[in-house]
Image (cartoon, grey):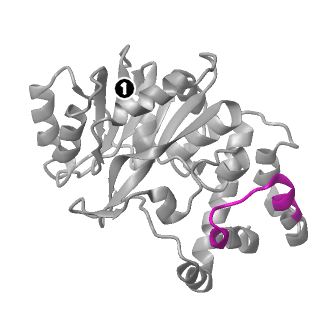
Amino acid sequence: MNIYHTSEIAILMAVFNGEKFLEEQLDSLLAQTHSAWTAYIHDDGSTDGTLSILENYAARYPDRFVRIDGVPTGSSRDNFFYLFQCVDAPLYMCCDQDDVWLPDKIEQTLRRMQEIDAAPEKPCMVYTDLTVADESLHVIAESMDRYQKLNMADAGISHVLVQNVATGCTMMANRSLRDRMLQLREPDSVIMHDWWAALVAAQFGVMCYLDRPTILYRQHSGNDTGAQQAGLRLYLDKLFHQKKEIHDSVEAFRKQAAVFAETFSLPEDSVVAVYARINTFSKCKRLKIYRKYKIKKSPLQRQLGIWLFG
């Protein structure tokens, strides 16, 4: 594996069959008001015109876009982990292929990162709100935080354990956070790279929320993840008709917590380690643990799934 070194911000871009929206995203990077960045791009085995687009941009802007070789990883999560391994930089940003960055995204995020008064060895993350847009970039919701009622500003470990508040395409991470992330040895139990990053920052460092959108978060049929409006009636319907799916997702939260506790040898009485073995307790004991450690999702209707199936 070749390691790329840079003193600038490293934008990590994981792509796969992204020809439909890729050029708009690359152009939005070129339009950034902050210019000290290089984008490192790994294609995960595209069969459409993605590669020709990347080759064109890399040829036209060789100081901006670097293609990283490597076999397909099989998922967006593993593609981003691979990129983190391949690039050594002081600061990292993750970039999806189908969104559009607002022109001052890097500038505003970097300013907030520079305001964090933390030692270099402390893992730090800045993450922001998003504007939700449809396939044609017509705005669906100015704020994903308010649209989904996520309470993104709550970056306590008890919240992040069961709900990722930091969307990867908005986050900036320092080198210390990246180094801690890569201590992972069992990626198959990690739900997504950004959630793992948020757990590391919440447990060992600083998470700082910028309450403003920095991205047009495009929703379309090919999204790996997406923004769904929070609604009590819709979620109650889901609780009734999708019990297995909710149970499986809650179990995935627990397994991720178990891997996190093991990776970093957390004390048995830590909230992460306790939650990792919550399936060994009675239902009554579990409810007491949720209350004691304030383990919660936002809004309340999402918490019902934790209480019922966790």
Instruction: Decide which of 79, 194 is in the foreground and name it.
Output: 194
**Which of the 4 image quarters holds residue 181?**
top right
Q: Is residue 132 left or right of residue 113?
A: left
Which quadrant would the C terminus be assigned to in this image? bottom right
Q: Is residue 240 above or below residue 187?
A: below
Specify whether residue 44 is in view.
no
Q: Is residue 200 above or below residue 89?
A: below
Q: Please say whether residue 201 is one of the residues in the magenta stretch.
A: no
**Which of the 4 image quarters holds residue 28?**
top left
Q: Position of residue 97 (x, y in %)?
A: 28, 47
Secondary element under disc 1, as helix, strand or loop, is strand
Q: Is residue 165 left or right of residue 12?
A: right
Q: Which residue corresponds to the image point at 56% horizontal and 83% vertical from the top-left?
A: 233
Q: Position of residue 223 (x, y in %)?
A: 35, 60
Majority SS type along the magenta span: helix
Q: Amino acid at mark 1?
A: Ala
Q: Which residue is tagged 1?
A: 10
The magenta segment is 288-302
Specify whether residue 273 is in view.
yes
Q: Please say whether residue 293 is one of the residues in the magenta stretch.
A: yes
Q: Position of residue 186 (x, y in %)?
A: 60, 42
Q: Which residue corresponds to the image point at 79% horizontal and 55% vertical from the top-left?
A: 294
Q: How many marks?
A: 1
Q: Position of residue 206 (x, y in %)?
A: 63, 32
Q: Is residue 164 left or right of residue 134?
A: right
Q: Is residue 209 above or below residue 307?
A: above
Instruction: Decide which of 20, 227 is in the foreground and name it.
Output: 227
Q: Residues within 10 Å of mark 1 (few under 14, many from 20)?
A: many
**Which of the 4 image quarters holds residue 27?**
top left
Which quadrant would the N terminus be assigned to in this image? top left
